Image: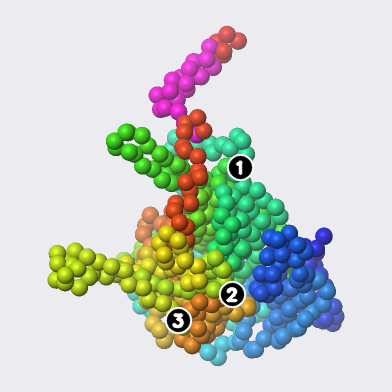
Amino acid sequence: MAPHPYDQISDEELRLIVKLVKDAYPSEKPSFIQLDRLDPPKNVMLQYLSAEKQGVSPPMIPRRAYAYFYINQVFHKALVNLTYKHIICDVKLPEGVVGPLVADDVIVVEDLATNHPICRAEIEKLCLPDNIHVVCDPWIYGTDDPNEKRLLIQCYMYLANKNHPESNHYSLPLKYSPVFDGLTKEFVRMDYLPSGADEAVINETTAWDEYPLVEYHPDLNGCTKLRDVKPLIVSQPEGVSFTVDNHKIEWQDWTFYVVPNSREGAVIYDIHFKGRSVIYRLSLSEMTVPYGDPRGPFHRKQAFDLGDCGFGVNGNTLGLGCECLGVIKYFDNRRVSTAGDVEIIPNTVCMHEQDAGILYKHVNYRTGHSVVARRREFVVQIIATVANYEYAVQYIFDQVGEIKISVRATGILSTMPIDRDVDVDYGTLVGPRVMAAFHQHLLSFRIDPAIDGHKNTVVYDDILRMEENTPLNPYNVGFYSKRSYVEKAGHIDQSPFTNRAYKIINENVINPTSKKPVGYKIVMPARQMIMASPESYNTKRAKFATEQIWVTKYEEDRLYAAGEFTNQSQKDTGIAEWANGVDNVRDTDNIVWCTLGFTHVPKPEDFPVMPVEMHEIGITPFSFFEKNPALDLPQATNKFNKSVLFEENERSKRSSTSSTCCKKASL
């Protein structure tokens, strides 16, 4: 049977792409970087989905894929027709456009950073004891030179406990940093890192035993007595309330497709609630992490975690009973090695239900009777490790029609060496002679809305004071809502003091109750955007990070907020070009881009491993329904939920212990 157009790329399809590329270059050795399926053209896919819903034969849509690869250090992009098994086109990309980093190349550079003769000489200067060794943390090179065209990797060096593989090297950063060519693997130069408040390099002699490693792993962190945490079991004895048919999910009146991929981690397609269309495509589009340390070479620390390496190919293999609780459904992800071998990354996407407290409640004070329903959620989660940081991205569906995007940042701070008695106002001392620089996490989520159809409009509503001392407002207490329409592609300014609310509406469908267009509200607290100067490369490369909400016209293959190729890019080729102030975006097919930003000022409590910092976007119905759509939920009862009183639990526990003791005594 032919695969569904939304189906994840298969092992066989990946092997086909590899074979086609190798056949096209029989005398060369392609180095593969990233391969994955392409979305079907939207207009054709809408016909397919419509036919599916009507139970008639859908149109045949050829499956397509892209392939990034190098031939003799020349970067290529090919488009492949998977259905008819041929290469559609193969383009040599311009000089200076480089591909994402891949694990195979990074591993080679890690080895060179400790074994290249020049690097060995630096290590020998340290006179390390036998139990300490040098560890490399390869980093995205960033941008500061318009003439630099090579794919470079900056290596930050650390010390770790040689006797334990989980030792926290981030607590002992070193003061030298080799740079390698990521393709040829040639040594480029040695950077010596500043360790004072300015760019001065201070070669202070260090007695390493004076500065112990700050460890996080349970084997090493020194916590010999653990807290008494009793089991909290999530049980679903009658099974789950969701169904999975390949990639199609049905849960509590929601239907949608969850499809893992290499770059975005997972994409959610064709989202409907109670039979009504809400969103055509939802994904994390890009994330940039610029650092605020102005000293070279730290000024180049700006990662684009999706475009520079890929969220899906760096996805964690999730463990049952760890990241998700209850009855879990997993999806795998896939990547291809530089040689073209297909590798499975198991269990990178987890899906489950969770209780989320009260959904609604009211007590009639006249009768004392109450109604209460509990809120249950369906969670789609992917967690990626990109060097030191972990990002957990959750798409959460509830029973009242809301979609919540939750981002949790954890992992380990990226650290820099700092000399004795030095303090700076752009970083925090988190350990002995170790500093964590201020930085930002700016994530762009791409929403392709379909609010009761594909002709939508973005508006923003401000709450304003009424004019004072008028016949309508003689006591000066009135306030009202003023609506503004986004007519042309661009951004919307933040305005927290007018309670500005962003909404996506369908002007062609009127709610019978409110007499207003149906819509969904984007709930985003006002946040600080990118702090780098508008003239800096950091900002030029990430225009999306300058504003919280963008609206652009829909065009095929406009998927990535900063453009398709971000590694060592010099400008944003995404929103910077698409938010042009010219394209009409009212009452048409448009895209909404939400920048979820948080400025991270590290604190000692974030080290040696960071408790999660959580930020959210809400996509919630606003005049979409005629009344609360969750009135069809059963009322909460203990017959259903089976909770017990603390006292009863304690008596049961004592009785169980006593019974066990008696049994032992009688043996």
| Kind of residue sitting beneath label 2 | Leu
Q: Position of residue 387 (x, y in %)?
A: 55, 64
Instruction: Find numbered disc 3 in the image and state the secondary structure of the residue it sits on.
Output: loop
Q: Work out whether residue 111 or residue 354 is closer to the camera in this orientation and state it.
A: 354
Q: Which residue is mark 3?
A: 487
| Total tally of numbered discs in the picture | 3
Crowd band around label 3 with a 10 angstrom C-alpha radius: few (<14), some (14–19), many (20+): some
Q: Residue at x 82, y 60 (%)?
A: 1
Residue named by callout 2: 559
Task: Give me the residue at 73% from left, 73% from top.
Answer: 65
**Which one is nearer the viewer's eye here, 111 or 425?**
425
Give, as a three-letter code, the residue at label 3: Glu
Could you tell me which residue is drawn at 63 percent across and 78 percent down? 556
- Secondary structure found at label 1: loop
Q: Foreground: 551 or 337? A: 551
Query: Splitting the image into 4 quarters, where does residue 420 fall?
Result: bottom left
Q: Which residue is mark 1?
A: 240
Dots 2 and 1: beta carbons under 8 Å?
no
User: Mark 2 and mark 3 in contact (Cβ < 8 Å)?
Assistant: no
Query: Can I make out residue 225 in this image?
Result: no
Find the distance from the CA under tag 3 to the CA under tag 2: 21 Å
